[in-house]
Image (cartoon, helix red, strand yellow):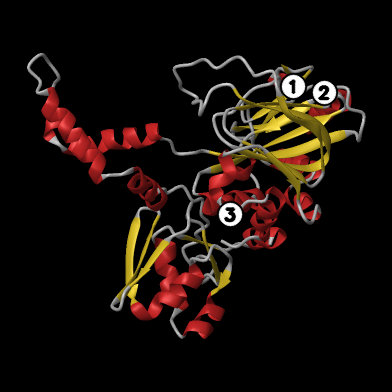
Amino acid sequence: MDLRFVRDLEQALAWDNAGELGRTFARGALPDPEVAARLLTPHRLLDLLSWRSVDFPQIRVLQDGVDVHTRSYLTSRTSRRGQSVPIADTEKLGVLLGDGAQVVVDALNHLDPALETACRALQWWCGMPVQVNTYLTTGDAAGFDVHWDDHPTVIVQVAGSKWWEVRGPSRAAPLYRDTDPNVEPPDAVVWSGVLRAGDVIRIPRGWWHSATRTGHDDDRLSLHLTFGMTPHTGIDWISWLGDLARDDERFRHDLGPDTDHATLAAALAELAREHSPRDYLVHRRQTDVRPRRSVTGGAFGPPEKLMCTTPFPPDIVETNEAVTVIAAGRHLRFARTAAQCARLLLSGRPVDLADVAATTGVDAHKLGAVLLEEGLCTEATPALCSAYTALD
């Protein structure tokens, strides 16, 4: 998926490839700061909270670095049939923001098509699941104390300004579930300064950092997005091997004093040789089935536009006899003549089926119906098309 938003991030952070994501700290600025505003604005965030159902802990509000009780900013709307839906009370939320507060909303990509599109584009680029959290801070409200994350992050300042401090790691490659509590940050500061609209930083996994508006007089607010990538580690590969081992009877027997440990260890080594870490990464990319899709089943007429929404780019393998598409846990085989049509439909951008048919000479409506039924594509709604256009 070739999206301008990702290209601008590459330019801002001098990326050559996704492997640089977790290596070291970097900062830069988007070539066009307006791209940041297309992702989100403070007013659009409040609009989303006004019209979407949210509840704690997806939404949190802090004052002086301490969580505010949910009754101060959440309410519920009850229908005449007694159905209750949690929702933000934007009037109360506005009072808190007026006094100075930080509003944190996790996984905003689940509520907004532009941010969902941005996360999917980053997933296709880096090969890791991506979630975006948003932080709106007003006045001189404090942020979180110095801490580290168990995943690399890319922070995009979209409005206002905020002061940051970044330190290096105190433990190599720390994990959320680990043998070391990792609670002592290093003394040396790698970078400290102010992020303004359009500025970008990347923070590797395990690097300590903090952000606040306390004592910062510039502007009246700050809004930034944190794109968090979930890396795959050697621990994940070992867990996958454990699942594969269930197919081998030798691993299913009880362990005891008479267990042939040497034979079992040799069998494990053989399993690891046959299923490498690279195989694990391919398996995850080809079997992840988390796309959220809009499918009307023809209720509104045949779809005119489709968009590939697989978590990661489909693998398209061409031979002299056929073209095979592997994605979202599916292996689909088509005639060799459908290769160009399949590549266009699976490009990750909204495509007009009539245009694809005219370009390729293939019945794109028929092929698209298969991709839609098998879960690789979604009907490209106006909201999805608009989101893609805004970031391209």
Kind of residue indicated by mark 3: Ala
Residue 326: percent from left, percent from top:
37, 60
Q: Which mark is residue 141?
A: 2
Question: Which comes before the other along the chain, label 2 or label 1?
Answer: 1
Cα separation, mark 2 vs mark 1, equals 8 Å
Vertical comparison of 95 with 320: above or below: above
Residue 388: percent from left, percent from top:
65, 60
Cα separation, mark 1 vs mark 3, equals 31 Å
CB-based contact (under 8 Å), mark 2 and mark 1: yes
Question: Which comes before the other along the chain, label 3 or label 2?
Answer: 3
Question: Which comes before the other along the chain, label 1 or label 3?
Answer: 1
Q: Which mark is residue 154?
A: none
Q: Secondary structure at mark 1?
A: strand
324 lies left or right of 47:
left
Any part of residue 365 in sight = no
Please rate how many residues cluster around mark 1, counting C-alpha atoms within 10 Å: few if below 14, some from 14 to 19, many from 20: many
* Most foreground residue, 327 or 376: 327
* Most foreground residue, 165 or 61: 165
Please rate how many residues cluster around mark 2, counting C-alpha atoms within 10 Å: few if below 14, some from 14 to 19, many from 20: many
> According to the image, label 1 marks what residue?
62
Please rate how many residues cluster around mark 3, counting C-alpha atoms within 10 Å: few if below 14, some from 14 to 19, many from 20: many
Residue furthest front in the image? 188
Q: Secondary structure at mark 2?
A: loop
Vertical comparison of 258 with 44: above or below: above
> Looking at the figure, which quarter contains the C terminus?
bottom right
218 lies left or right of 116:
right
Q: Residue at x 76, y 51 (%)?
A: 30
> Looking at the figure, which quarter contains the N terminus?
bottom right
In this rendering, the label closer to the viewer, 1 or 3: 3
Q: Which mark is residue 121?
A: 3
Q: Residue at x 58, y 43 (%)?
A: 21
